[in-house]
Image (cartoon, rainbow, N blue to C red):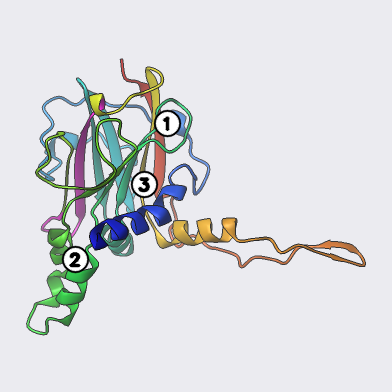
Amino acid sequence: MVKNKYCWLIWSMILPLLSFSQKKTKTEEYSFLSIPHIEIDGNLDEWKGHFYQKDSELWQCALALEGDHLYAAVVVKDPALQNEAIMRGILLNLSYNTKKKDGAQLLFPVADKESIRALRNDEDRDKSNIKQDILQASRGYLVKGFTKVRDGLLSFQNDYGIKAVAKLDSSNVLLYEASIPLDLIHFKSDSIAVQVAVITQYMLMQKIARDRPSNNTMGMYGIYRPTQPTLKDPYSEKTEIWVTGSIK
């Protein structure tokens, strides 16, 4: 029961962000790739030379359609963005059509609060490997919106064919790889939109500010609208993209 409440708490904070674009995204720059023989091992050897933001020093990603599977790869180079990815997760959101809306969502990594607390309180543990330790403490994937999969925490050893791996390589670059069988989702058309996003604190705060009641009041000079605090994205690039295309 406690674990289920924890899962829903995470989703209640993150899901409203899925269809919200941080910055204007030029989706025409991206398309689904065709990369054969992808193995979900986190090494990303098959993806070399295929990433969308090939010159970015912040992060890179790519999406591929092969057979009846969607594949995703993400590389996070920036240490601060790595922390956000590890603590808040990398999101795959498969809209049911080309509208950029909430669809079938896979969130991973899923940081386990109890494990993190234990890791930080263990004085004998080497803190230099804390990022990798947090990744290894993740207990599964968070899923929502699939036609054939129950919402909630999904085991790594699941029977649905959903897979995701996240790890740090020898250069301390965060590597992420995932695959989703498309037959787990009832799409409304043959054309879909897929979102890849590193969930950040900026996205969370932006959502809170956007939903905060306006508290408009009427004064002698008309309606007074109190100003909201200005939010500044700490990253020089957007940390999410949308890709549209056909699944047939």
Q: From mark 1 to mark 3, how far is it between C-alphas?
A: 16 Å
Q: Is residue 153 left or right of residue 19?
A: left
Q: Which residue is mark 3?
A: 197
- Seen at 71% across and 64% down, the residue is 215
Q: Is residue 208 left or right of residue 15?
A: right
Q: Which residue is mark 1?
A: 29
Single out the mark in the foreground, 2 or 1.
2
Of the image marks 3 and 2, the number of the one nearer the N terminus: 2
User: Is residue 197 or residue 147 the one in the foreground?
Assistant: 147
The amino acid type found where label 2 is placed reads Lys
Categorize mark 2 by other alpha carbons within 10 Å: few (<14), some (14-19), many (20+): some
- Seen at 58% across and 56% down, the residue is 211
Asked which secondary structure carries label 1, the reply is helix
**Percent of width and height locating residue 32:** 31, 27
Asked which secondary structure carries label 3, the reply is strand
Residue 199, picture quadrant: bottom left
Residue 170 shown in magenta = yes
Numbered badge on residue 131? 2
Q: Is residue 238 above or below residue 28?
A: below
Which residue is at the far top? 248
> Could one spot residue 78 in this view of the protein?
no
Residue 126 shown in magenta = no
**Percent of width and height locating residue 162:** 18, 37
The amino acid type found where label 1 is placed reads Glu
Q: Is residue 183 above or below residue 225?
A: above
Q: Is residue 248 above or below residue 230?
A: above
Single out the mark in the foreground, 1 or 3.
3
Of the image marks 1 and 3, the number of the one nearer the N terminus: 1
Q: Are marks 1 and 3 in contact (CB under 8 Å)?
A: no
